[in-house]
Image: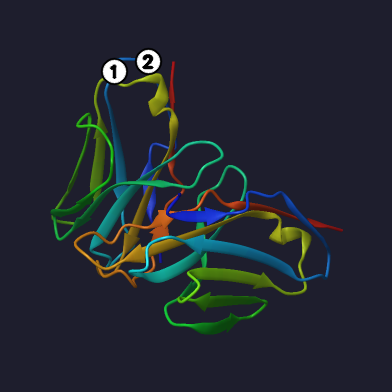
């Protein structure tokens, strides 16, 4: 079982729709959760962080965390073609190393 | 403010050679981490440095080494290059080393091994 799992997609949604991206993690001591957006040929860009159960909203983005279910999601409202990218879920856990453990990413395409 | 800067942006090497990649963190950031990203996968953790000390090492062979300098910049060295080392090498910095600190990535160095 991978430590962080995401549906690879591709996920296609029409412009203006809600895109829902999901991520599960296996390590219960995971503490911090991040969503990165990566355009083709570019480096990952941090878009959201979430640390406690519940929802966190930032503009058109909402991150949701459920530690009991070991599940974190990202909702993108009013999706735009410019949102087309790969979305990477990453987690960290306490301990001597603070490395990010990434999923393989979900490729999102927003159709005009 | 400048973000994380990495050099060079692209590099072509042949098998058996060695390579040095460089990273300057965001001003004020003391933690630097290195990741390797191969096509179609998420980044894989290689090293983390904080205050010039190694704080973490991923599952990479001893051919990979790194260091952090007093100005918090960092180098990643890879010896005896293999074809499988072809990847995007990413440097990320954060203000502190704690697990809740967001890490910000540079544009990466794309390494191709012939």
Q: Position of residue A65 (x, y in %)?
A: 51, 76
- Give the number of callouts: 2
Mark 1 — residue?
Answer: B17
* Disc 2, SS: loop
Q: In the rendered view, would you say B100 is above or below A89?
A: below
Which is nearer the eye, A37 or A5? A5
Residue B10: image x %, image y %?
45, 32
Location of the C terminus of chain A by quadrant is: bottom right
A77 displayed left or right of B91: right
Q: Is residue A10 above or below residue A17?
A: above
Report if residue A101 is visible in the image.
yes
Q: Secondary structure at mark 1?
A: loop
Instruction: Tell me whether the residue at label 1 lies in contact with that at label 2, contact meaning CB atoms closer than 8 angstroms.
Output: yes
In the image, taking residue A93 as reference, residue B88 lies left or right, namely: right
Tell me the residue that label 2 is attached to: B14
Q: Which mark is residue B85?
A: none
Is any atom of residue B72 visible in this view? no
Evaluate whether label 1 is on the same chain as label 2.
yes
Q: Residue at x 38, y 51 (%)?
A: B5
Label 1 CA crowd tier, 10 Å (few <14, some 14–19, many 20+): few
Q: Chain of mark 1?
A: B
Chain designation of label 2: B
- Residue name at image x 46 percent, y 48 percent: B107
- Toward the viewer: B98 or A55? A55
B93 or B42: nearer the viewer: B42
Q: Label 1 to label 2, Cα distance in Å?
A: 6 Å
- Please state which of residues B32 and A12 is positioned toward the viewer in this rendering: A12
Q: In the image, A21: left or right of B41?
A: right
Q: x and y percent of residue B87 in the render?
A: 45, 33
Percent of width and height locating residue A74: 61, 70
Position of B61 with respect to A91 (left or right) is left
């Amino acid at each position: 079982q991978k430590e962080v799992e995401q549906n690879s997609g591709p996920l296609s949604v029409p412009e203006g729709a809600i895109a829902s991206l999901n991520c599960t993690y296996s390590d219960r001591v995971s503490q911090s959760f991040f969503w990165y957006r990566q355009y083709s040929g570019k480096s990952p860009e941090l878009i959201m962080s979430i640390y406690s159960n519940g929802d966190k909203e930032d503009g058109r983005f909402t991150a949701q965390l459920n530690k009991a279910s070991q599940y974190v999601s990202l909702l993108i409202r009013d999706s735009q073609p410019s949102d087309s990218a790969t979305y990477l879920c990453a987690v960290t856990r306490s301990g001597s190393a603070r490395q990010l453990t990434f999923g393989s990413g979900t490729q999102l395409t927003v159709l005009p | 403010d400048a973000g994380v800067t990495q050099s060079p942006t692209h590099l072509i090497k042949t098998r058996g050679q060695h390579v040095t990649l460089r990273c300057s963190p965001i001003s004020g950031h003391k933690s630097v981490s290195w990741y390797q990203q191969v096509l179609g996968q998420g980044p894989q953790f290689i090293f983390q440095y904080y205050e010039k000390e190694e704080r973490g090492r991923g599952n990479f062979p001893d051919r990979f080494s790194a260091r952090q300098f007093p100005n918090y910049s960092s180098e990643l060295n890879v010896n005896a290059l293999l074809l499988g080392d072809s990847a995007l090498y990413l440097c990320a910095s954060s203000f502190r080393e704690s697990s809740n600190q967001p890490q910000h990535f540079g544009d990466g160095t794309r390494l191709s091994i012939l």
